[in-house]
Structure formats: structure tokens, C-alpha cells
Image (cartoon, rainbow, N blue to C red):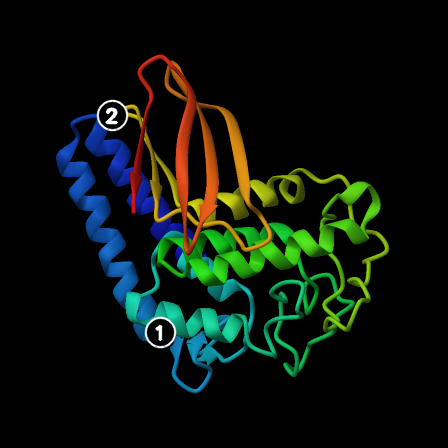
């Protein structure tokens, strides 16, 4: 929740600045900076190697490994020096099932791989975590999430990622264990592959300048290329063709309408 409040302050500051409300923007940025400092002091747990799940009634950190820590990367509240360590814990043997990040780490008191929130794997949760990885330049980690969830999808009806599935560890050629009453289709699960791809391609938008920006785009080894058609920005749109090339990717723009431009940062 602190991460999303931080993101709201930063987003509000950007909106205020675009409207010429500089005093408001500075005030919101100040709130974001202050919250980030308090968050680091209160929630970072050296023993856990990650951020606490919560503070108890006496404001003591609950040192529980949970996927929530990945959302601190999503909005940027996490200190840059912490990001790689948080990612390593989420992708470690307790946090990671082999198909995705568990909502709660194996070995925690309430861990249950068949529980709705206490050990299952949610595709949309993993997609948001992947966006956090991408924000901090952890593209290898984002590629891993894209790969494992792409390999999970064919085990479900119509190759459709469900709302969630069980958090049992991956074994041989067996697929993930379905959660019996998971919603399928579900909107945010359906959006997960797009967010995972966004994280790996480093896609961002600058509406004022009419720019679609790709920062160090990459594709996993099993995916030679992908085409994103009619990506809209303002009154224009672009079609992107991304092809894997060595450790990076080559981006072409087969079609462009209106004033939208594409900028690629190698």
C-alpha cells in the first residue's frame, strides 16, 4: 500500500506539472520523497533480505516473504540498492514455484500452496512484479517470468492463463496444479502476457512528445520475434516489429500513422 501511495504521489506530481501547477507538483514530489524515506526505515528487513509484509500494532515489521515486495519495485519506492536483492529473494526457492512468484514464501507460518492468497501463483501479480523488474533494469528476471508463465499457459484450457493456480513446486514435465475455482477468463490474467512483454521490451510512453520509447528491448531465447500492431498514442499509432538479435533486439516500424514516433535506447 505504501508503494501505491508513492506511485500516486509521483503520478499526481507529473499531472500537476503538465498543467503548469508547479507548486502542487513540488508538494506531491516532497510527499513521495518523505514516504520513501519512512518506508525504507520501517519496512526493510536485513534478515529477510526483502521488505516486510506489514507492520504490526506496535509498528514492528512482520518479517514474512511475500510477493507484495515486488510491488515496491513496480512503483519505484524501493531503493535502487535493494532491488536486485528483493528480486533474488522472490525468485529463490522459497518465493518461486518454477511457474511464478508465490503470494507467500514456502516455509512461512501460513504457507499453503493451495491457498487463495497464502502460497498460490497469480499471473497478474507476476506481471506487475515483472514490470518492477524492468523498471530497475532487471530484464533477465523479467524474461524468466515471461518464459515460465508462457510455459504454464498450454497446461490450461484454451492456453488461457487463469486467475491463479496452485504454488506447488515445478516437477519434470508435469504442469502447474490448477486452482479448482479460479476465474477463467479473467481480465487482469488476460492482460498479464501484455504486461510481461512490456517489461521485457522496456516500453514507455511520452504523450506530450508523441513518443513510444523502448529501453534496452529483449526477447527470451525461445521467441524469435513479435509484432505489436496499432499501438496508439494520442491521435497517432505505430506498429512495432521486434526481432531477437544476439543478447538484444532489433526494432522496426512497418507502419506509422499521425505524429507518433518510436525511440529505441540500446
Extreme-right residue of the structure:
180
Q: Where 106 sits versus 74, above or below?
A: below
Q: Secondary structure at mark 2?
A: loop
- Residue 141 is at least partly visible in this image: yes
Position of residue 165 in the picture relative to residue 16 (left or right): right
Q: Tell me the number on the disc at residue 209.
A: 2
Q: Give the Cα separation between the discs numbered 2 and 1.
A: 39 Å
Residue position marked by numbered label 1 in the rendering: 42
| Residue at 43%, 58% in the rendered image | 139
| Residue 40 rendering spot, x and y as whole percentages | 32, 70
Position of residue 90 in the picture relative to residue 85 (left or right): right
Position of residue 33 in the picture relative to residue 96 (left or right): left
- Residue 56 is at least partly visible in this image: no
Extreme-left residue of the structure:
23
Query: Picture quarter containing residue 61?
Result: bottom left
| Residue at 80%, 62% in the rendered image | 175
| Residue at 62%, 65% in the rendered image | 103
Query: Who comes first in sequence, dot 2 or dot 1?
Result: 1
Q: Nearer the viewer, residue 193 or 41?
A: 193
Q: Tell me the number on the disc at residue 29.
A: none
Q: Cβ–Cβ below 8 Å for labels 2 and 1?
A: no
| Residue at 73%, 71% in the rendered image | 170
Amino acid at each position: 500500500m505504501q508503494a501505491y501511495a508513492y506511485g500516486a504521489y509521483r503520478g499526481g506530481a507529473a499531472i500537476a506539472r503538465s498543467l503548469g501547477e508547479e507548486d502542487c507538483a513540488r508538494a506531491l514530489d516532497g510527499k513521495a520523497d518523505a514516504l520513501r524515506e519512512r518506508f525504507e526505515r520501517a519496512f526493510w528487513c536485513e534478515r529477510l533480505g526483502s521488505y516486510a509484509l506489514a507492520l504490526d500494532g506496535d509498528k514492528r515489521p512482520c518479517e514474512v516473504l511475500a510477493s507484495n515486495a515486488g510491488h515496491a519495485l513496480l512503483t519505484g519506492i524501493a531503493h535502487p540498492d535493494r532491488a536486485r536483492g528483493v528480486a533474488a529473494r522472490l525468485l529463490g526457492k522459497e518465493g518461486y514455484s518454477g511457474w511464478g512468484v508465490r503470494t507467500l514464501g514456502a516455509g512461512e507460518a501460513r504457507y499453503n500452496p493451495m491457498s487463495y492468497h497464502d502460497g498460490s501463483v497469480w499471473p497478474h501479480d507476476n506481471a506487475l512484479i515483472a514490470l518492477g523488474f524492468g523498471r530497475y533494469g532487471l530484464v533477465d528476471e523479467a524474461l524468466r517470468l515471461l518464459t515460465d508463465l508462457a510455459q504454464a499457459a498450454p497446461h490450461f484450457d484454451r492456453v488461457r492463463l487463469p486467475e491463479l493456480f496452485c504454488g506447488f513446486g515445478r516437477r519434470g514435465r508435469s504442469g502447474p496444479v490448477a486452482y479448482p475455482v479460479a476465474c477463467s477468463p479473467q481480465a487482469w490474467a488476460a492482460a498479464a502476457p501484455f504486461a510481461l512483454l512490456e517489461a521485457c521490451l522496456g516500453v514507455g510512453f511520452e504523450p506530450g512528445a508523441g513518443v513510444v520509447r523502448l529501453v534496452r528491448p529483449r526477447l527470451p531465447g525461445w521467441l524469435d520475434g513479435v509484432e505489436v500492431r496499432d499501438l496508439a498514442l494520442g491521435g497517432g499509432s505505430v506498429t512495432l516489429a521486434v526481432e531477437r538479435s544476439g543478447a538484444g533486439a532489433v526494432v522496426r516500424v512497418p507502419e506509422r500513422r499521425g505524429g507518433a514516433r518510436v525511440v529505441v535506447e540500446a
